Amino acid sequence: MTDQEQTADDMRHELGDVWAPAAKEVELVLGDEKLGLVEQGGGWRVVPEADRARVRTALADGARYGYVVDGEGPFPDPRSLRQPEGVHELSAGFDPSAHRWSDDAWRGRELAGSVVYELHIGTFTPEGTLDAAAERLPYLAELGIGFVELLPVNAFNGPYNWGYDGVLWSAVHEGYGGPAAYERFVDAAHAQGIGVIQDVVYNHLGPSGNYLPKFGPYLLEGGATAWGDSVNLDGPKSDEVRAFILDNARLWLEDYRVDGLRLDAVHAFVDRRAVHLLEDLSVLARDVEHRTGRAKVLIAESDLNDPRLVSPRDRGGYGVHGQWSDDYHHAVHVALTGEAEGYYADFADPEALAKVLRGGFYHDGTYSSFRERRHGKHIDADLVAPSQLVVCSQNHDQVGNRAAGDRPSASLDYSRLAVAATLVLASPFTPMLFMGEEYGARTPWQFFTSHPEPELARATAEGRLKEFEKMGWDSSLVPDPQDPETRRRSILDWSEAETDDGARLLALYRRLIQARSELPGLWSGRFDETEVVTGTEGGTRWIAWNRPGAGVAVNLGPGAAELRLPGSGARRAVVATDEAIRVDGDRIAFPGPGAVVLGE
């Protein structure tokens, strides 16, 4: 690396400096004054050293600042940590090291054996803040949650949003409490023995407040995802763009001490380099882990069904710890609801659930009718473990992207919700719950935005309607995302957990999570250690599987069923969804839909 390249690299990390390779002039606005910056190697920096020291002090004290680029602006800092007045206004200095952490003994958690709980700060509590969410952490610890996975918290325009319209990746949304509240939340989670996974979006930026193109080629010309222009991961000047992403990942993992990152829609990355961004992120996570002595986890959201993501780097993989498995969700959903439209169609196969339990993916090189082509690749049991797949019966996408944002609890009774819980929590995979599902929340989780710009608000609402019309949904069910009531309806009603059905389901979730600790064979080990049998009896479908030292039997309904667990030897019921379920040796009798977890 040349001295010039080294200088540019150093400048990316210094507050007050900025990368703007095509600019002719850049000024730093600091309070009421302007400082002219000096160009060095594509970056612009404050000189002399006396001014640099003054800028550092001012920003540590929270001073407002921004940049004027070739006479335009001022714009927020691309690396801003705080936006008190919103994404269109000046940034505010913030010092992450000022927080007095109380988690020095915390060493993190492993993904295998843990249960993940996905939540959205803005609707998890009526207050919609990080501090209010922190008050619920003892409840999650009692439930047995290992990780909370926060939907994106970085700054977006307007007071409310899912979070996927973020534009300043390092700034915590002020409405949630800003970065200081974020540090308090992470500290409080660790005190309860809970790790924090932060959902980050590196594949696109939101439609309002994205000033990155004013500074440099952060976006890919002519490239687009379903949500906006692609990020420049492999084009000219992409070294700096990738460094920008990696620095952001390091901020969460090191400065904010989060335990992992959930990487949004990595299938939308446009990256043709020999070393993929996912591999770079894996290397970074392991570096932070080794230097801090705290375990770090990366989970990728991908619809590629590509085992390379979670295969070891020394075997040609990217080394990511885990990935979402939509196939398992789809198989469970179709088995319990009978819905078989759109991408659910292939999962109407009676053997879909069994295939996914055995091998992780349904589409492992098979034809996908939704995509009209072959899709996916077989998982090599020597390279990938079942616990590396994160599975669910609900998540923000699968609920929120339904026309009415309705949860399974809107159409399924207790017995089938209990079956869904068992299929996820007693599976060989890593379970993820969506906030409120543990007590059968009936509040919908609908798509909502609060774009102040009338044109953008109208385009968002119209685009949502067209999207569902194309999919064949009843457009009259689609709520206006800009209506404040849409967000209000999506806030959890915690009183539901105290109803008879809510308390009963919550107790089952607690017991199932506890059983995972008592029977580690449910989730530890290899794919080829899962033995699955299925059957039908008078129109009723059932499925059962064996794992080392544990077994699961499920009657999918609708009527009674009697089945025989694979393997041999008597079993004892560890958890049953209905006290009327009878276990006699290796035979199980169900009066109706239900499930039982068994031990030796």
Image (spheres, rainbow, N blue to C red):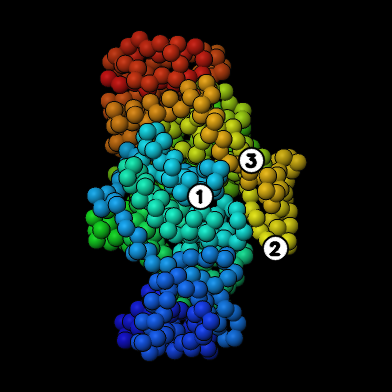
Name the N-terminal-most of marks 1 and 2. 1
Kind of element beneath mark 1 = loop
Position of residue 132 relative to residue 273, above or below, is: above
When asked about the image quadrant of residue 548, the answer is: top left
> Picture coordinates of residue 588 (x, y %)?
40, 13
Label 2 and label 3: CA atoms lie apart by 23 Å
Position of residue 108 relative to residue 30, above or below, is: above
Residue 315 as seen in the image, left or right of residue 180: left
Q: Amino acid at mark 1?
A: Thr
Q: Residue at x 51, y 71 (%)?
A: 91
Q: Amino acid at mark 3?
A: Arg
Q: Nearer the viewer, residue 276 or 373?
A: 276
Task: Mark yes or no: residue 538 visible.
Answer: yes
Q: Which mark is residue 129?
A: 1
> Picture coordinates of residue 103 (x, y %)?
29, 51
Kind of element beneath mark 3 = helix
Q: Give the residue number, with chain letter if any, for mark 3.
A: 489
Q: Give the residue number, with chain letter if any, for mark 2.
A: 453
Q: Amino acid at mark 2?
A: Glu
Q: Nearer the viewer, residue 274 or 250?
A: 250
Question: Pointers 2 and 3 in contact (CB under 8 A)?
Answer: no
Label 3 and label 1: CA atoms lie apart by 17 Å
Q: Residue at x 44, y 59 (%)?
A: 179
